Amino acid sequence: MSSASDERKRGKMILVGFDHSQILERRFKAAGYEVLTVRDGMAAIDHARREPWDAAVLVSTGSLVNVADTAFNLRDLNRSIEIIILVNRLGTRSNRFLRPLLEHPIERTRVLTRRQLQRELAAFLARQQRSATR
């Protein structure tokens, strides 16, 4: 018999990088994800080698090389994993670092700002609540 919390589970997600206030982790858990938070890409790759994950959110700390390498390695380990690269902003200064990734995107990988991700999660949770009340 499945419980209501089992039915809400959407999958397993690795959150890679610094989430100082754990806001992202709490929001993904509220959306029904099982979340594992790791400090860096190497730890994420180690976990991905041991078990399959449905999604990964890579919090960019300014080093696109590390984020891109992590994304490529995760993609090699699991062709179907959804990857989100989270950046501070898509402004002109950061475009210099993001340009290669935006011009040559990695399959099933999106680059989002925190605000864009928060909007998507809020919309998802609102849809989930509406469907639960029907």
Image (cartoon, rainbow, N blue to C red):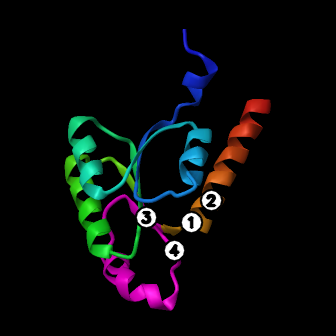
Q: Amino acid at mark 1?
A: Arg
User: Is tag 4's residue or tag 3's residue first in the polypeptide sequence?
Assistant: 4
Q: CA distance from mark 3 to mark 2?
A: 14 Å
Residue 129 x, y percent position in the rendering: 74, 38
Q: Provide the secondary structure element on which disc 3 rests.
A: strand
* 21 in relation to 111, above or below: above
Q: Is residue 95 visible?
A: yes
The magenta span reads 84-111
Asked whether the beta carbons under mark 2 and mark 1 sit within 8 Å of each other, the answer is yes
User: Is tag 2's residue or tag 4's residue first in the polypeptide sequence?
Assistant: 4
Q: CA distance from mark 2 to mark 1?
A: 6 Å
Task: Report whether 32 appears left or right of 49.
Answer: right
In depth, the one of 28 and 123 nearer the eye is 28
- Residue on which disc 4 sits: 88
- Residue on which disc 3 sits: 110
- Residue on which disc 2 sits: 118
Neighbour tally class for label 1: few under 14, some 14-19, many 20 plus, Cα within 10 Å: some
* Residue 95 included in the magenta stretch of the image: yes
Q: Provide the secondary structure element on which disc 4 rests.
A: loop
Which mark lies nearer to you, 4 or 3?
4
- Image quadrant assignment for residue 118: bottom right
- The quarter in which the N terminus is drawn is top right
